[in-house]
Image (cartoon, helix red, strand yellow):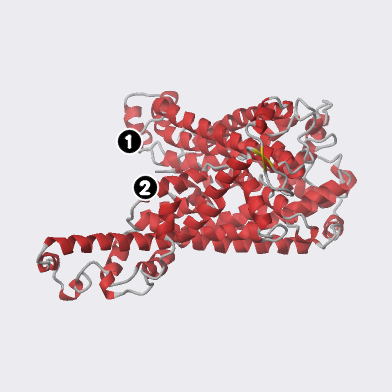
Amino acid sequence: MTDATIDPPVGTGSRGRRISKHALLVAFGVVMLYPLLWMVSSSVKPTELIFRDPSIWPSRLTLGNYVDGWSALAHPFHYYLVNSALIAIGAVIGNLLSCSLAAYAFARLKFRGRKFFFAAMLATLMLPIHVLIVPQYVLFSKLGWINTTLPLVVPKFFAHDAFFIFLMVQFIRQLPRELDEAALMDGCGHFRIYWRIIIPLSVPALTTSAIFTFIWTWNDFFSQLIFLTNPDLYTVPVALRSFLDAQGETNWGQLFAMSIVALAPIFGFFLAGQRYLTQGLATTGLK
Amino acid sequence: MSDRGGTGMPSPPAPAPGPPPHAQPPATGQAPVAGRPAAAGSVRGRGPDVPPRRRRRASFARRRDRVAYVFLAPWFIGMVVFTIGPIFASLYLSFTDYTLLSPPKWLGFDNYREMLDDPRLRKSLVVTFQYVFVSVPLQLILALGLAMLLNRGVRGLAIYRSVFYLPSLLAGSVSIAILWRQIFGNDGLINQVLDLVGIEGTSWVAHPDFALGTLVLLNAWTFGAPMVIFLAGLRQIPQMYYEAAAVDGAGVVARFFRITLPLLTPVIFFNLVLQMIGAFQSFTQAFVISGGQGGPADATLLYTLYLYDRGFGSFEMGYASAMAWSLLVVIAALTAANFLLAKRWVFYSD
C-alpha cells in the first residue's frame, strides 16, 4: 500500500479506472477520426452509396472515383500536384536559408538593437496576413508577378515566416556555446561557425521547419487563390475548389478521391516526422 | 528602425566570410597555442594610452554589429519590402479610392465612414466575434482536458497524441472543407447517423442558424496543437509539488486547481493568444463551405471573407485596406488586453 502511494505517477488509479480512461480516449479518438476514415472509404464507394452509407466498410469497392477524378479537370491531377510541390519546395528552401541566418544572429550574436529587432520579429507573428495582402497584391501586380509563383516563393527567401525564426532561435539557444566559442578562439568566422557548427547541430529544428513549411504551403489557399488566377497555374487547393464549384454536389466520390490524394503528402510527412512536429510545437510554447 | 537596418545592410564587403586574422578580438587567436589563459592580461597591457583602445573597442563593436546585420540582411529586406512597407501602404490606401486601374484618389475618412454604416460589415464582425469567442475556448478546454487525461503514464501516449494531433495538420486544407460540406450537408454523414436513431436532420451548412456552428466545430477539431503544447507544459511541473500535496491529503480536484492550473497559466495564456489570432484569420473553411459567399444569409461571412470580397471580388482596394487596418487595430487591442489581463491571472513562478 505504501509502495503504491510512493509511486503514483505511472498508472495512476486502479485497474478499473485505467480501463475506463482508455475507453474514453479511444471513444474520443474514434469520433475525431471517423469523418476522415469515412471519407477514405467513401472515395472507393460508388457515389450513390455516399448518400446513404454511414459505415466505413464499403459494401462495394471501386477505384473509378480515382480514375475519373484524376482527369476531371482541364489538366490531369498530377499537373496540379507538381505545381503545388514546386511552390512548396521553393518555400522550404527559402525558409530554411533565410530563417536560419536570422536565427543565428538573434541566438548567438550581440549587436545594437537586438532586443528591439527581436521584439519586432515577434510582433510580426501576430500580424494577420489580411493586413498585408492588399498592398502586397498592388506591389506584385506592379512587378508583373501576378499569375506567377514568385509572390508565393520569393518572400520566403526574406524570412517572411517569422515563426520559423522564432522556432530556430529557441532551438539554437539550447545548444552548448562551448563549440562555437572554441571555434571563435581558433579564428573561425561567424559564417563558418554558422555553416559548419550550428547548421549541422540544428537539423532537428530545420526538419521541423521544413515539414511545417511544406504542410502549410501545401494547404495554403488564401494567397494561392489571390495570386494564381490562371487555371494553368492552379495548385491543388485552388484546383480542388474549382472542381467543387464546377461539379457542385453531384460528384462527391471523385471530389473525395482527389481530396484524399491532396491530403496524402501531408499524411506522409505526419507519419514520417511527427516526433519533429510535436517537439517543435512544444519548444515554441515553452520559455 | 528601417533606416538603421539600412546602414547595416549595404555594407557587405567588411565581414568577409573567411577568418581575417585581425578581425578577431586582439591576440586571443594565438592564446590557445600558447596554452596560457592569462594571456588576456598581457594583451591589455600592450596598449600604452587610452584613446586608441577605446577606438579599437568601438570599431570592434561596429564590426560585430555589421556581422549581425549581414546575417539579418534577408530578414531586414523582407521586413521593409513585405511587411512594414505594406503596412504603411495600406494605411495610405485606406484613405483613398483605388481599383488598381487608375491612381489612388484621396478620400479622407470616407472609407471608414462607409464602414460605420455598412450592414454587411457589421454582420461580419458579429459572425467573426461569435466564431472566435466560442471556438477558441471550446478548443482550449478540449485541449487541456485531453492533455490532463494523457498526462503521466498513460500507455500508448504517443499514439493518442498523434491521433489527436493529426486533425490540426489537415483542417486548414480545402480537402477537409469539402469533407465538412458533405458531412453537414442534407444527405451528409451526420444526417445519415441521425437517421439511424430516427431524427430527421436538416442541411446544417445551408441553415443560417447552424452554418457557423459547423465552422466552430471544425476549429474545435484542431485542439491537438494546443494539446501538444499543454502536454509539454504539464511535464515541466515538478513532481514534488504533487507529492507534497498528496502527503497533505489533497485530492485530485484540489491538486488540479491548486497546483496544475496555476502553474500552467503561462502556457494557457500562450495558447489563448496564438489561437485567438489564428481564429481571427480563418478564411479557407468558410470560403469553401459557403462557396465563397459567406452564406447562407451571411451567416458565415467571416471578416476575412468580406475583406476578400471587397478587395479581390470587386477590387475596392481602398475599402479593403480600411477593413484590413481596422482588423489590425482590433487584433492589436485584443492582444494588448490579453497581456494586461494576464497580469491578473497568469502566474510566473520565476
Tell me the residue at 48%/56% (across/down): B75
Judging depth in this view, the residue of B296 and A127 nearest the camera is A127
Q: Is residue B127 visible?
A: no
Subunit bearing disc 1 = B
Judging depth in this view, the residue of A119 and B55 nearest the camera is B55
Task: Determine if marks 1 and 2 fall on one subunit.
Answer: no
Quarter that holds the C terminus of chain B: top left
Q: Is residue B64 visible?
A: yes
Tell me the residue at 55%/49% (across/down): B85
Residue type indicated by callout 2: Lys
Subunit bearing disc 2 = A
Residue type indicated by callout 1: Met
Disc ID at residue B240: 1
Tell me the residue at 81%/36% (across/down): B185
- In percent of width and height, residue B342 lies at 43, 29
As drawn, is A260 to the left or to the right of B231?
A: right
Q: Eyeballing the image, is A181 above or below B93? A: below
Question: Can you tell which quarter of the image residue B322 is in?
Answer: top right
- In percent of width and height, residue A155 lies at 58, 57
- In percent of width and height, residue B264 lies at 43, 34
Question: Can you tell which quarter of the image residue A175 is in?
Answer: bottom left
For the residues labelled 1 and 2, the Cα–Cα distance comes to 36 Å
How many labels, in total?
2
Judging depth in this view, the residue of B237 and A21 nearest the camera is B237
As drawn, is A245 to the left or to the right of A189?
A: right
Q: Eyeballing the image, is B23 above or below B307? A: below
Query: Mark 1 and 2 residues: CB-CB less than 8 Å, in contact?
Result: no
Which type of secondary structure does the marked residue at label 1 adopt? helix
- In percent of width and height, residue B66 lies at 36, 62
Q: Eyeballing the image, is B215 above or below B126? A: below
| Residue wearing tag 2 | A115
User: Dot 1, crowdedness within 10 Å: few (<14), some or many (≥20)?
Assistant: few
